[in-house]
Image (cartoon, rainbow, N blue to C red):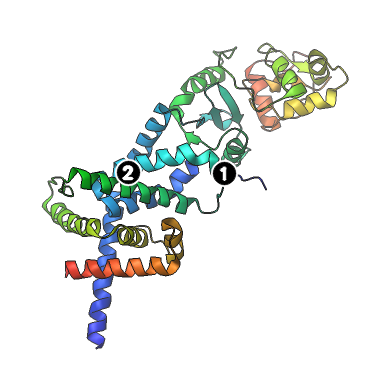
Amino acid sequence: MSSKNENTTEGRLNLERTLRDAAQRNSAGNEALAAEFLRRAEQEGLLDVAYAEIDTPVGRILLAGTSRGLVRVAFPNQPPDEVLEQLADSVSPRLLESPGRLDEARRELDRYFEGRLHDFDLPLDWQLTHGFYRKVLRATARIPYGQTRSYKQMATTAGSPRAVRAAGSALGSNPLPIIVPCHRVLRTGGTLGGYGGGLDVKQALLELEGALGSGD
Amino acid sequence: MKKKLPPFQQLLERHQGDVIGFLIASVGPQDAEDCFQETFLAALRAYPRLEDDRNLRGWLLTIAHRKAIDHHRSRQRRATPVGDAPEVADPRAAAAHKKESGIWHKVAALPPKQRAAVALRFACDLPHREIAAALDISEDAARRNVHEGIKQLRLELA
């Protein structure tokens, strides 16, 4: 009886193992499957948000875009998983890694960090910012390369000279840093103020642009 | 409470192994890739409207199960036999392939519920509770279908 039991158990284990092994062996090409899925999702217009991570002198940056344009740039001090979850929640959960869709942004950023590009020419999707914040950020997008402004100047340009604190919050919430150059906004008197990506990054960007020490 | 769906990329990375394993066991290695694409495209299409985000793997496997059933139906209509194994150069791999291919033929010949239950149990390692959820049947029925399916396979492979 015990030998019959063993046989049955062994038979079962063999069958189970064969099924498991076969399923695993045949699914070795998961990357190709995922690549083909991405291709077809794009083809059928089902990809609402594409993202990619790129390496830059200030660390690994996450880029995300919609059909309208670049929607989010995130620095390494923000965990990518959190940024992606926010995007899924606030833009669309149809979000896939698709480096090809962000090639143009990557190329422009590469050239910016080499000092060879001063003005970004990328379509932007402003949907993550609204009202006064959007006004401040749109005004910020027009600050020329290598120049700086004060928080007070940005509040004034956006139409509310006394809303200096709100202008600071708007810049702190910038979903498109570097491209919308909030690093060019400093405290009156020239101290750095704040920066979402960390003050060392703000300092590095201003140095790259030769904007430090020029005064305000 | 507002539902928060995770990025679809996360579903793809976490569950593509289970979905392809299930489909290989359900429709065979040759047609599993097409069914895989159909499954994930249907899921991506429906995703923003999904109300219940508690069992995303189960949701994907339910879709995969429906695609597998569609696949078997269209096969029956065309009345073509389950595909032969593609040619493999390495004789050892060929032998393994033949053996596996034999199993897929047998699995494919099971009644749909048993076929799906066996695939979910052994290709995806799903507990009976999750098999029940994916196939929309009771846990008892899930256990019974796995049991009957395996019994049948063992008889045929003996």
User: Farthest front residue?
Assistant: B77
| A210 sits to left or right of A20 | right
- B151 or A72, nearer to the observer: B151
Q: Mark yes or no: residue B90 visible.
A: yes
Do the residues indicated by labels 2 and 1 lie within the same chain of the protein?
yes
Q: Residue furthest right?
A: A162
Placement of B126 over or under A147, stated as above or below: below
Marks 2 and 1 sit apart, C-alpha to C-alpha, by 24 Å
The local crowd at label 2, few if under 14, some if 14 to 19, many if 20 or more residues have their Cα within 10 Å, is: many
Res. B5 mark: 1
Residue A82 image-quadrant placement: top right
Give me the residue at 59% from left, 35% from top: A87
Q: Position of residue B110 (x, y in %)?
A: 25, 60
Give the amino acid at mark 2: Cys
Taking the image as shown, residue B61 lies to the left or right of residue A182, namely left
Q: Amino acid at mark 1?
A: Leu
